[in-house]
Amino acid sequence: MKKILILSILFFISAFSQSLKSKIDNVLEDKFFESCLVSIQVEDLTANKTLYKKNEKFLLRPASNMKIITSTAGLLYLTPDYEFSTDLYYDGFVSNDTLHGNIYVVGGCDPDFVTQDLYPFVDAIESLNISVINGNIYGDVSFKDSLYWGKGWMWDDDPSFDAPYLSALSINDNCVEVMVQQSEYKDKPTVTIIPGTDYLTVKNESTFDGDIKFEITRSWIEKKNEVVVKGKFPISSRYVKAYVNVLNPEKYFLTLFSEVLDSNNIKTLGTIEIKNLLQETNLLYSFKRKYSEIIENLNKTSDNLSAEMTLYALADKYSGKPATADSGVQFINLLIDSIGLNHKDYRIVDGSGVSHYNNVSSELLVNVLKYFYDKQPDLYELLYNSFPVAGIDGTLENRMRKTSAANNVHAKTGTLTGVSCISGYLTNTKNNTIAFSIMMQNYVGSSSKAKEFQDEICRILSEIY
């Protein structure tokens, strides 16, 4: 009787595995995959069993799936309680309402600092009854090296907000929002920069007539902080908005700070400059943000700046300042070795996956996900909750809706030209936790077709029984 039962179970498992394999294989028989490379690995973490593998050792570009590796290295080696700090100092002395000295802002690579975060700095200055700064505003960006982009970032990604310039002093994702609106009182659309600042100029060449394609950009070839709007405004639209990156983000930070001080009746008489902090200074305020607060934005919105600043924070822990991407990658290598793989089998050069130099495998991504599920349950929960949820939020908000994968798949997406990936977790109908990685590379045109196949595989996995 026992023998019959065991044989029945084995037959059921075999039939199930064959059924799952045939369903996924059937998806991959599409003509799309005659030229597109695909790499897949699927693991049932609850049962500790491999469910599906195909080309799992192929080295492909991960795009933003690289953020899975970077964010987990951050959780493990920085810890959730690591604090990114942006510090305010002053030198000189205060007499009556005047600071006879300078203000210093020391950057600590906080990627989520926004204009509103400047107001505690204003309050700290006001606490000394200062209404005039008879000196300069300095920015100390010595935390990291002077490289403004990662290795392998493409020159023509400029001026996309997806390719922010990197600095120890960052604000508003080192971008501005450009709002172009119709106006019945003008012969051309109105252009507004958000936040309002004199750091950028505007060249408005847009019209309501003509046949030139409408475009919002920045004078990036000329290396100028000049927003350029040109072409025929789409009459059917009430407004059009776009985001562009800014050059020298540390000076953007300091300019916004100076403008916020001015709007709060604190006058600065000097200039804005970059200079390392002197020892003869006084700490006035520290703005701190924990890594546990940063990882959600990093993964859900696929924020490239957050990933790169995580890499620099790791680098500082590894070899001190100035932090470099190469030093940060040492911790990623340590993570890879600790999960039983060999970091020398892969190539990793940045934290966000923007670089086309990165080469990883679906096997690596699944093993990272498995390690956190098996060995780091507290960190696993943070990681799981940081991923976009299918049909609900982040980069998966509009995917897998009205399917069994909706509100089930928690996964990181990744897209570059000719590259589309998705890796993460889901729960099957037996309530087992599944880790999966699907990487697709070398197709022409939109990524929409690749995403359709990925979504279908996620639906199949969600319906495993």
Image (tube, rainbow, N blue to C red):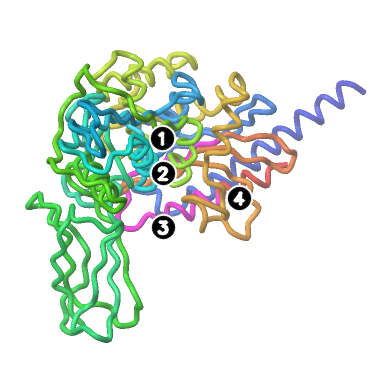
Magenta residues (range)? 436-456
Residue 214 seen in the current view: yes
First of labels 2, 4 by sequence position: 2
Camera-nearest label, 4 or 1: 1
First of labels 4, 1 by sequence position: 1
Disc 2 to disc 4, C-alpha distance: 23 Å
Instruction: Report the residue at 30% width, 74% height from top.
Output: 181
Across and down, in percent, residue 465 comes to 73, 42
Q: Are marks 4 and 3 in contact (CB under 8 Å)?
A: no
SS for callout 2: loop
SS for callout 1: helix
Asked if residue 458 lies in the magenta stretch, the reply is no
Q: Amino acid at mark 2?
A: Ser
Disc 4 to disc 3, C-alpha distance: 16 Å
Query: To which residue does mark 2 refer?
Result: 302
Instruction: Report the residue at 47% width, 27% height from top.
Output: 72
